[in-house]
Image: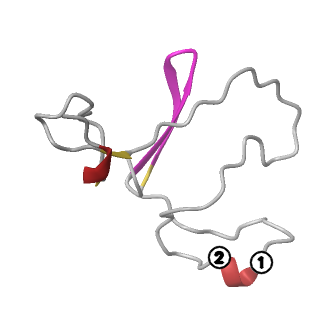
Amino acid sequence: MGDCIVKQVVNGDTVLTYTKPVHALGVVTGFDPAQTHEGQAIKSGYIARQAEGHNVDIKNVRLLNLEGCMDRSARNYKSYYIKSNPSACAQ
């Protein structure tokens, strides 16, 4: 849900939920300091499927686009959109 909630769902079960995620350096190495602003809200960026270096098997990864038609009268309206894109509306 934008920069408010991040959920990781595995086989239909929510396994992790992050609220209001922010940039934190912690034990991160090899990062570009110009790209990371500690303490600021994370609004965009990359998604790491596995960042800790442990083995993991991944079958499917699905991302939900939260930008789209927010006009309730349109055929393709979705209640979960958080960013309006009027050009995407199908009447």
Which residue in the protein does label 2 denote?
A: 36
The residue tagged 1 is 32
Q: Determine the main secondary structure of the stretch shown in magenta.
A: strand
Furthest-bottom residue in this view: 34
Direction left: furthest residue: 73
Residue at 37% x, 54% y is 4
Give the structural element (helix, strand or loop) at label 1: loop
Q: Which residue is drawn at 86% across and 71% down?
A: 30
Q: Could you say where residue 65 lies in the image, as x and y percent from the top left?
A: 45, 42
Answer left or right for 26 relative to 23: right
Residue found at x 25% / y 35%: 90
Residue 53 occupies quadrant: top right
Asked which secondary structure carries label 2, the reply is loop
Q: Does the CB distance between marks 2 and 1 fall below 8 Å?
A: yes
The segment highlighted magenta reads 5-18
Residue 23 locus on image (x, y percent): 58, 68
- In the picture, measured across the screen, residue 24 lies left or right of residue 88, that is right
User: Which is nearer the eye, 89 or 41?
Assistant: 89
Is disc 2 surrounded by few (<14), some (14 to 19) or many (20+) residues within 10 Å? some
The image position of residue 89, as x and y in percent, is 25, 41
